[in-house]
């Protein structure tokens, strides 16, 4: 996952690589990828497009503000566990991650 988060020299990741990295990341957390495969595919596509257009894998449902330091907080996976949506609904902003039910 570390390599996935770093901005490499011209290295970009395709949708399957991003999905694999997010699955690996979630496997060690209190959350999993949303079981809605179509939704996940659309969100992963957004992450890949954000990297292509903005140079970093920004969360597809959050808008960057042009301040690099602040925008780093929006790189997927963002810090969603402190947000109201996570606390109340058990999912991140865009619904890519949801709380585990098997814990």
Image (cartoon, rainbow, N blue to C red):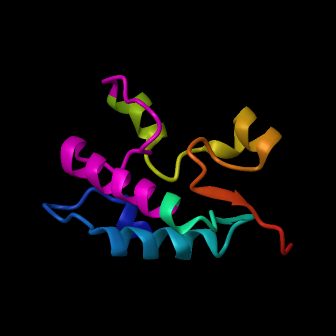
Q: Is residue 45 magenta?
A: yes
Q: What residue is at 69 percent from the left and 58 percent from the top?
A: 98
**Residue 24: x and y, percent?**
54, 76
In what quadrant of the picture does the N terminus appear? bottom left
Q: Which is more toward the observer, 56 or 14?
A: 14
In what quadrant of the picture does the C terminus appear? bottom right
Q: Is residue 97 magenta?
A: no
Looking at the rendering, the stretch of residues picked out in magenta corresponds to 40-67
**Residue 44: x and y, percent?**
41, 59
The mark total stands at 0
**Residue 43: x and y, percent?**
44, 54
Q: Which is more toward the observer, 41 or 83?
A: 41
Q: Which is more toward the observer, 60 or 68?
A: 60
Q: What residue is at 73 percent from the left and 43 percent from the top?
A: 86
- The image quadrant of residue 21 is bottom left
* Position of residue 27 in the picture relative to residue 50 (left or right): right
* Position of residue 71 in the picture relative to residue 56 (left or right): right
**Residue 71: x and y, percent?**
40, 33
* Position of residue 82 in the picture relative to residue 94 (left or right): right
Residue projecting furthest to the right? 103
Q: Is residue 21 above or below residue 86?
A: below
Q: What residue is at 62 percent from the left and 57 percent from the top?
A: 97
Q: What residue is at 78 percent from the left and 44 percent from the top?
A: 89
Q: Is residue 35 above or below residue 46?
A: below
* Position of residue 54 in the picture relative to residue 10 (left or right): right
């Amino acid at each position: 996952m570390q390599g996935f988060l770093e901005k490499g020299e011209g290295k970009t990741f395709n949708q399957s690589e991003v999905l694999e990295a997010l699955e690996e990341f979630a496997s060690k957390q209190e959350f999993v990828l949303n079981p809605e495969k179509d939704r996940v595919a659309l969100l992963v596509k957004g992450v890949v497009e954000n990297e292509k257009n903005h140079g970093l894998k920004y969360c597809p449902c959050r808008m960057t503000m042009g301040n690099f330091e602040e925008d780093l907080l929006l790189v997927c996976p963002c810090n969603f566990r402190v947000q109201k949506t996570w606390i109340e609904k058990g999912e991140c902003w865009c619904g890519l991650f949801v709380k585990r039910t098997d814990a």
